[in-house]
Image: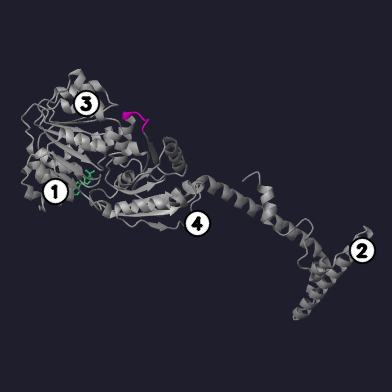
Amino acid sequence: MAKSFASFGFRPELMQGIQDLYYKEPTPIQEEAIPLILEGKDVIGQAQTGTGKTAAFMLPILNGLEAGKRDIQVLILTPTRELSIQIAKEVEKLGKHLDINVLSLHGGTDIDRQLNKLKETVHVVVGTPGRVLDHMKRGSLHFGRISTLVLDEADKMMEMGFLEDVEQVIVHTPSQRQVLLFSATMPDLVKKLAHRFMKQPPHIKIEGKQKTVEQIEQFYYVTNQSDKTDALVDVLEQEQPFLTIVFANTQVRVQQLTARLQENGLSAQALYGDLSQNKREQLMKQFREIRFQYLIATDIAARGLDVEGVTHVINYDLPNDVESYIHRVGRTGRAGQKGKAISLISPRQKNLMGRFAKATKASIEERILQAGRHLDAGRRQRAEEREAHFVELRQQQQKEQKKEKDKEFAPVREALKKKAKVKPGYKKKLARELDELQTKYEQNRKKAEAIAARKAGKTVKPAAKKAGKGGAGRPAKGGRPFQPSAGRSNGKGRG
Ligand code: AMP
């Protein structure tokens, strides 16, 4: 089995493209698929995203391309426009030294611009089935001379209801073309499609851990739904990631989360299906250029998104199926770099997490969030306001207590002043006398209080008597010791 790209006998220009991308050695799917594709066989490659499957079919195709021919030689069908753009980019990079043209045809862009491009020589067309069929019906495209047809993420195309479109496109290609079908799973529709249009294709299945997933540290935190956003902010503070993709399951949630992270001063942008194609491309470009750090996205919008430097993928919502989990996780750890995949889950979702761990043959451990750190900006501000209010209240009460005490001890201080005129050396004696005076003062004060109470028809409780002893512990008039509950009731309006 081949262990190096050189052993495939690729053209020097193609080897240069591989070197430019720093691919050191072929991945397992590349090792197995490339020799078969070079032989001209139809091939079924069952492999998930992140395994290097695009280069697995693209390298042998590019090796056989004839730049001098004016006809379209390769058609690649993909389920989404993002994946289409992604593949076109990869073809451009790998074929940089081959002098070939690639065109991505997908919905959401100006069809006239695409038509103009088609007037030039195009060697490779990548596109979604709908838009490709559109061009075929207009007569602006024909695939009568293609040598290779690729059906990428075939299961996804079937899932999205593209079966008829795909079939219509295939029947307009020459019967001698080579067909390469790549799919993460093999549902019946995909098997039927393969049976109908492929010639005894060898079936390559890449099982086990994906090369890129090995580089990804996966773990999760258990949190309640109501604390999740705070937990997310906490995780981001803790991790200090470089580029991060946060996945949520609905557009609304994506928008809400983006707003919340922006409130917390984080540079976040939302990517979801309803955005215009232009806007989506613009956002992806900005993310690649690191103009913002946090991309909050739904699955569909992020399909095929391949950005180097994504250090963290966070599942704010857990996906429902293993394939989506693997796809999301595969957005980090690209091109052999290290990455982290973190999920925020409810206690009930532990089982699902276990299924993902089994499917990815990875250990996905539970970690504990440091409590209290995950306050969002709004809550943090309110808590700070409350605390400031308590402090202010405490200071005010202390001032009042001091004032009251000063007033009560005025006679003592007067006496002290008089005694202070006596010669030094009598300090100890003075201190003793001051003590006696204070005690006497307290006794008199209590007596006066008891008399006043009797006059008012009340009796003085023994506990109050006790508290008065020695002058300490008695709640001063208008100067109650600080009680948080008192503060809270005062601060209600603020919190
Ligand atoms: P794919 O499975 O096609 O989505 O590819 C996953 C990622 O692996 C892409 O970022 C590729 O550029 C990268 N890749 C493909 N082949 C190799 C290789 N032989 N060595 C290192 N990275 C690769």
Front residue of 149/377: it is 149
Q: Is mark 2 within 8 Å of ligand 1?
A: no
Q: CA distance from mark 1 to mark 4?
A: 49 Å
- Residue 132 badge: 3
Amino acid type, label 4:
Ala
Front residue of 56/164: it is 164
Q: Secondary structure at mark 4?
A: loop
Amino acid type, label 1:
Glu
- Measured as percent of width and height from the top left, residue 116 is found at 19, 21
Q: CA distance from mark 3 to mark 4?
A: 53 Å
In primary-sequence order, the first of circles 1 and 2 is 1
Determine the main secondary structure of the stretch shown in magenta. Answer: loop
Q: CA distance from mark 2 to mark 4?
A: 55 Å
Up the image or down, 437 lies above or below 171; here it is below
Q: Secondary structure at mark 3?
A: helix
Of circles 2 and 3, the one toward us is 3
Q: Which residue is mark 1?
A: 32
In the image, is residue 218 part of the stretch drawn in magenta?
A: no
Q: CA distance from mark 1 to mark 2?
A: 104 Å
Crowding around mark 2 (Cα neighbors within 10 Å: few <14, some 14 to 19, many 20+) is: some
- Residue for point 11% across, 25% down: 144
Numbered range of the magenta stretch: 273-277
- Measured as percent of width and height from the top left, residue 368 is found at 44, 58
Q: Which residue is mark 4?
A: 371
Up the image or down, 478 lies above or below 117; here it is below
Crowding around mark 4 (Cα neighbors within 10 Å: few <14, some 14 to 19, many 20+) is: few
Q: Is mark 4 within 8 Å of ligand 1?
A: no
Asked whether disc 1 touches disc 2, contact meaning CB atoms under 8 Å apart, the reply is no
